[in-house]
Amino acid sequence: MDQSENELTRFLSSADEETRQQILSLSKQDMADLYSQILAGNDPYAFLKTLEGRKWSGKDADGDILSQGDIYGEHPGSCGYCSSGAQGRWSYGLITRVLTVNDYQSLIDKGWRRSGTYCYKPINDKACCPNYTIRLDVNLFKSSNGQRKVLRRVDTFMNGNKPKKPQKVKRKKASELNDSYSMMLKKNVRDSIQSCIGRSTLPKAVELLLHDDDFQISIKRRRISKPKKRQRKLSDSKENSEPCTHEFYGLMSNVSFLISSHLKRQNPSISLLPSEISTVIVNSLPKECKASECRGFINFKTTSTFVEGITDHEEKHRDPELNSSREEKVEVSAKKTLTFEIVPSEFTTESHSIYQKYQMFVHNDSKSDCGEKQYTRFLCDTPLVPVKDQNAPKTYGFGSFHMKYRIDGKLICVGVIDILPKCISSVYLFYDPDYSHLNLGVFSALKEIEMVSTLSHEGFSEDFHYYYMGYYVHDCQKMKYKAAYSPSVLLCPKRFSWHPIAKLTAALAVSKYVVFSDVDPNGSSEETDLSYDSSKMLLVVNQKLVKVTNLLQASQEIVKPYLQELASLLGSD
C-alpha cells in the first residue's frame, strides 16, 4: 500500500490541476481501483478516462428517476411589491434540470416555487416583503357573494345577455348614486380609510375589506324633508324664479357599519362602534366634502338643487315598462360556447400572442420584454417529469400543463398549472384584455378549484384536495385577493406548519415577518426532517451517482457546509 501511495504521489505531482481535482473527487472504491491500476503498471490516465465514460442514467439503483439541479445560492433582487430598491428581495435558488413531481410537492410544502426551470425560496426574515405560501383545502371552500357574482356574469355573457324577468320598481328609502360628484365622494372616503390605516387610527385588518369583491362604498340620497317654513319663504320671495341653493345634509354613506361588522368577524376582541369609525373617517376627509358624523353615518352637505336634480334625472330615465306586466324589451344576442382544454406545457404561437397582448396591456411591458424566448423560458419550460400511473389523473397525469379557455373556439385565457400528488399549483394566468369585464382572474381560480374537486374523485389519493395559489404578501394590495378564497391557510416560514389567515391578521398588522407557529401553536403540520444526515444524501460526481459517505473524508468536509445549508432548506430526504 505504501508503494501505491508513493506511485500515486508521483502521479499527482506530474498531473495537471484538472486531473488532480478529478482524483480528489473520487469515491473510496474508485480510489482503490486507481491504486490497483498504478500498482499493475497500467496507465492511470486511461483508467480516469473510463470513469468519465460511465455516464449516470439519472436513475437510482432501483431504476427510479432522481431530481437533478445546480445550487444557485442565496442572492438579493429587486422587490416587485414595494419600492425598497435592489436589495429588498432575498431568496435561495436552484437551477433544476430534472424534478420529480413528488420532490416538487415536498419543495412547495417547504416554501419553494418555480419559474420555468428555476426554483426559489424567499428568505423571509431578510426580505422587505415576506412571501408566505398560501393554499386552500377545496373540501372546505366556501365561495363569497362576489365570486358567485363572477360566475353569474360569465354565465349571462355565454347565454347572450338573457333578459331578466319583469319586475316592479319599488321606491327605495335611499337610492345609490353614481354621478360624478358622488363618485368623487366615494374616492375621498376610500382614500380617507386608507390614510387612517396608515396612521393606525383604524386597524390594519380593514385593508382586507377594501379589497374584498363584495365591498362597495356607497353614497346614497337621504330621504328627508326640507323645513316647510323655509320653503314658503322661498316661494314668496321676489327671487323665487332662481334656483334654490339652500345647503343641507342630503347625501350619506353607511361605510362605518360595514367596517365595524368586518372587524368583529375578523377579531371579536376588536370593538369599534360605527360612530367611532365614522368620526375617524370624517376627521380625515378633505374640507370640501363638507362631511359630518351622525350616529355612525357619514353625511355630506349639498344643495337642495343638486338633490332635486338627481331625483328629476332618475324619474326621467326610468323605464316605464318596468312598472307594467309586459316583458322587458332587450335584444338577445347569440349564445356562446365556453370550452376548456388541458394540454402539456408547450409553446404555441396562439398562446404567445395572448400572453404578449396581456403583458403589454396589463403590466405595461414592452414588446421585447415578452417575446417568444421570454415566454418559453417563463411559462413553457419545466423541469417536472410527466407521470402517468395508477395514482395520477386518468386523462392528464402529473406534470406541467396549460389550461386553455375558449369562447366559440377563440382562445381568450390560459392558466399555467402544475398537477402534483397532493394539489393543483397555480403558476400564472394571462388572458385577452378584451375580455377583462368577465373577471377572468377570479373565474379561472374558481375553475381550477373545481378541477381539484373533480380530479379528487378520479382515483387520486386521499391527500389530493389542495389548491396552491403561490405566495401571499400581506402588505401588497394586489396579492391580498388570495385571502378571499376561504378558508385559506399560510405556511409557517420556520416550522412549515399550516395556519388559518384569520388567526394571523393581527400579528401581520404589527410585523411583516411572523413565525406563525408562535402565534398559533395548534396549526397542522407534517413530519419534516431538516437535520443534516450524510447517509441519506447522494451527489453526482464525474457523471456517477455517489453516496456522500463513500467520498474521502477530506472531500466530505469540503461539501458538508453546502449540504447542511441544503438540508435546512430542502430536508435531508
Image (cartoon, helix red, strand yellow):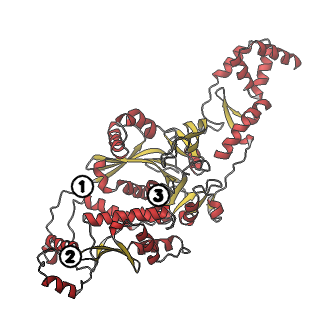
Horizontal relation, residue 351 to residue 177: left or right: right
Q: Are marks 1 and 2 in contact (CB under 8 Å)?
A: no
Horizontal relation, residue 341 to residue 453: left or right: left
Q: Amino acid at mark 3?
A: Lys
Which residue is denoted by mark 1 in the rendering? 336
Residue 247: in sight, yes or no?
yes
Q: Please report the residue visible at 53 percent of the width from the left and 66 percent of the height from the top.
A: 502
Q: Kindly report the distance in space between the C-alpha atoms of the residues bearing marks 1 and 2.
A: 27 Å
Which quadrant is home to the N terminus?
A: top right
Residue 5 in picture, x, y percent from top left? 84, 19
Which of the two labelled residues, at mark 2 and mark 3, occupies the earlier sequence position? 2
Q: Please report the residue visible at 74 percent of the width from the left and 40 percent of the height from the top.
A: 534
Which of the two labelled residues, at mark 1 and mark 2, occupies the earlier sequence position? 2
Residue 131 in picture, x, y percent from top left? 54, 51
Which residue is denoted by mark 3 in the rendering? 480
Q: Amino acid at mark 2?
A: Gln
Which callout, 1 or 2, points to the residue nearer the camera? 2
